[in-house]
Amino acid sequence: MTTSKSFRPARRLATLGLALGVGAVVATVTTRARAEVSFALAWRKDARAPACVDEATLREAVERRLDRRPFVDPARADIVIEVEESAVSRDTFRARVTERDRHGVLRGERLLEAQSCPSLRRAATLIVSLIIEPHLQGERAEEVTPAPPPEPHAASESAPPPSPTPRPRGAESAPAPRRDRESPPGLPPFYLSIGLGVGTTVGVLPSASATAFAVARLASPSSRWSLDWWGGYSLPQRLRRDGAVTGDFSAVEQRIRVCLGVARWSSHQLDTCAGVVGGAIVPSSSGIGQGKDRLRPLIGPTAALAFEKRAGPIAGRIELGAVYTLRQYDFSYLNQASERTRFYSTNTLLFFIALSGVGRISESPVGD
C-alpha cells in the first residue's frame, strides 16, 4: 500500500504533461490553419479600350503597401480578388473590384471611378489592400503566446484544460473594408474647367459680330449633366450716315446654361444645352444734336447643340445655337431736315456659332 501511494504524484504529473502537450499541439495546428488565408489577384480590361493599369503594376503596389507578398495562384487561393477595368471616356476610367471565395461565392464588390490612370491605380491599390489587411491582422493576432506552466501544487486528479491564449490588444476584430458601390475616398463630385473662345452672332449688331468670351464649366465624371457660364464682348461696328454722323455699336453678354450629354464616346461627346442670356447693346453716336446712347438690354432664353473633343484634361468645343430676345430695337436719329434716319434694327431671333477650348483646373485628389 505504501508503494502504491508513492507513485500517485508521478502519475498526476505525467497526466498533466500529456494534457499540456496535446493542448499545445492543437493550438499550433489551429493557429496554422487560421493563418493560411491566401489571396489571388486577377485584372481584366475592356477589349475595346487600351489598358490603364496592368496586373503586375497593381500587384507590386499592393505588396509595397502591405510590406509582404500575399498573392498565390488562383487554384490555391482562399479568396480571389478580381478587378475589371472599363473606359467611360478619354478622361474617365472605371474599375469594378469583386471579392469571391474559393467556391466562387461573391463576398463583396466596389465600383471605382477616377479621372486619370494614376488615380485609378492608387484607388485600386487602396481597396485591394483594405480587403487583404484585416486577414493579415488576424494572422498576427493568432500567434500563440505560451502560457506559464501551472504551479506544482495546483495539480489534481484530473488536469485542468489549458488556459485560453491571450490576444494582443487591438486585435479583437479588425473592421472589414466597405464594399459599397461608391467612388474612391477623396474623389470630388465635380471638376471645374475654364477657358476662352471666339464666335459670331447674327442679328444683334449691324453685321455678324466678332465676339471673344471666357467660359467656365462645372461637370461630374459620373454624370451626363454639366453647368457652364459665358462672359463675352462683341467688338464695335461703325456706321456712317449723312457724311458726319457716325454710330458705333458693340455688345456685352453673359450666358448661364445647363447641358446634357446625349451621346458619349471615348474622347468625344455631343451635348444639348439650354439656359438664359443677359446682356446689352452699347451704342455710341456722334454728329447728332441729341443722341440716345443709353444701353439696350438683351434678355432671353437660349439653346444650342455642342460637339466636344477631349484630350486628357483639355477639351475643344464647337457650338451652334440660337437666342430668342424678348425685345427688338430700332436705332435711328433725326437728320438736319428733321427726318428720321435709320442706323439698323436688331432681330428677335439671334443665331450664333462659337469655338472654345477649356482646361481642367481641379483634379481628383486620390492619394496613395
Image (cartoon, helix red, strand yellow):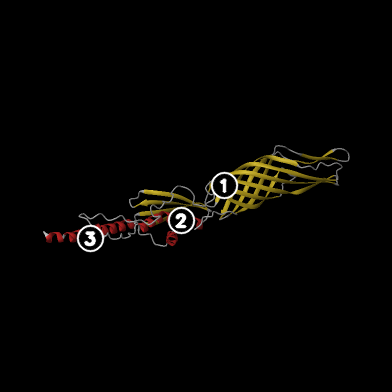
> Which residue lies under the disc numbered 2?
126
**Residue at 76% in and 45% down:** 282
Q: Which of marks 1 and 3 precedes in the sequence? A: 3
Location of residue 123 with respect to 320 vertically, above or below: below
How far apart, in angstroms, are the residues tagged by discs 2 and 3?
Answer: 48 Å
Q: Can you tell which quarter of the image residue 281 is in?
A: top right
Cβ atoms under marks 2 and 3 closer than 8 Å = no
**Residue at 73% in and 41% down:** 297
Location of residue 206 with respect to 57 vertically, above or below: above
Residue type marked 3: Gly
How far apart, in angstroms, are the residues tagged by discs 3 and 1?
Answer: 80 Å
Q: Nearer the viewer, residue 80 or 241?
A: 80
The number of numbered badges drawn on the structure is 3
Quarter containing the N terminus: bottom left
Residue 17 shows which numbered tag? 3
Label 1 sits on a secondary structure element that is strand
How far apart, in angstroms, are the residues tagged by discs 1 and 2?
Answer: 34 Å
Q: Is residue 234 left or right of residue 272?
A: right
Location of residue 66 with respect to 221 vertically, above or below: below
> Which residue lies under the disc numbered 1?
270
